[in-house]
Image (cartoon, grey):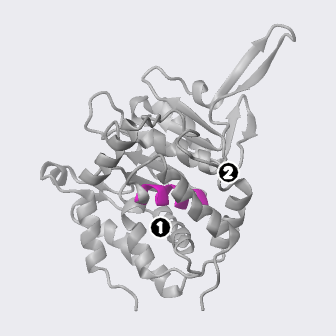
Amino acid sequence: MPAAPSPAALALLAVRAEVAKAVVGQDDTVTGLLIALLAGGHVLLEGVPGVAKTLLVRTLSTALSLDTKRVQFTPDLMPGDVTGSLIYDSSTSAFTFREGPVFTNILLADEINRTPPKTQASLLEAMEEHQVSVDGISRKLPAPFMVAATQNPVEYEGTYPLPEAQLDRFLLKLTMDLPGRDDEIEVIRRHSLGFDPQDLHAAGVRPVAGASELEQAREEVAQVTVAGEILAYVVDLVRATRTAPSFQLGVSPRGATAILKSARAYAWLSGRAFVTPDDIKALALPTLRHRVALRPEAEMDGVAVDGILLSILATVPVPR
């Protein structure tokens, strides 16, 4: 008989049910956000306006009893508006550091591609090292820490595509599509009954887990085993992206470690203590789609990144 789920596993699974009280039909996205938290990574959420990207992150942080702050990225936003800055205190005749919104557990970076690269880059140190350096002094960020950045599709006017170095720092890129007909009917029904996206408490969303459960869950995820043939399979997949004719940039070794971390968290959420090839396949698109770049001629021909990755998954031999 399989072992009973641990208290941490039950708590994390309960988070999904809480999020569903406010967000309809985004189960895959909720799972992706939980995977990123378990793996200590960051998430890029892409979708047209109005598909509940912001609501999803707010609801998740409420269900996990974590602090969250939101920054609306705009063309005139400065790096210090995100990380914090030194402020002159006239009473002491000295400069003191005022923390920016990055000092939180979940930072919602809304429409990150609407701010110039200089401000986008202000998050790099925070994402990679979980700290902020101002005036030569490094200040640690709270734990856990995750950036959940939303962006509209890059073909929209007035956007600044994220540089490759920053894209590579996101563990997952999740695409939020428009809801299906039945889900959209449910969304409208809830609003007709008085649902207020700004009042999650009234919607019945309650904290069902916290930082301690998340820390315990991370320790359990670290115990998930990965067989040698699975490691080889991951390497074969990423190496195939480097020779794909339509890609001018393939996946780096960091991408290989990212898919491994994601798959371990996914296996744990699925109640297993080992990673299977299906776990790798399930996480391949969200983990790799933002780590490759199409050749210009492929873009002109309307080739889709996900389509090429799916063809690679179909051709790379799967371990038995």
Q: Is residue 153 depicted above or below 75 in this figure?
A: below
- Left/right placement of residue 256 relative to residue 83 reads left
* Residue range highlighted in magenta: 28-39
- Left/right placement of residue 70 relative to residue 5 reads left
Which type of secondary structure does the marked residue at label 1 adopt? helix
Q: Residue at x 47, y 34 (%)?
A: 196
- Residue 58 in view (yes/no): yes
Residue farthest to the left? 301
Q: How far is disc 1 from disc 2 in space, using C-alphas?
A: 20 Å
| Image quadrant assignment for residue 147 | top right
Residue pointed to by mark 1:
259
Residue 7, how many percent across, how many down? 69, 69
Task: Give the amino acid type for the residue marked by disc 1 in the picture.
Answer: Ile
Residue 248, how many percent across, how many down? 28, 57
Q: Residue at x 56, y 35 (%)?
A: 122
Q: Quadrant of the N terminus?
A: bottom right
Q: Residue at x 63, y 76 (%)?
A: 5
Task: Give the amino acid type for the residue marked by disc 2 in the picture.
Answer: Pro
Numbered circle sitting on residue 144: 2
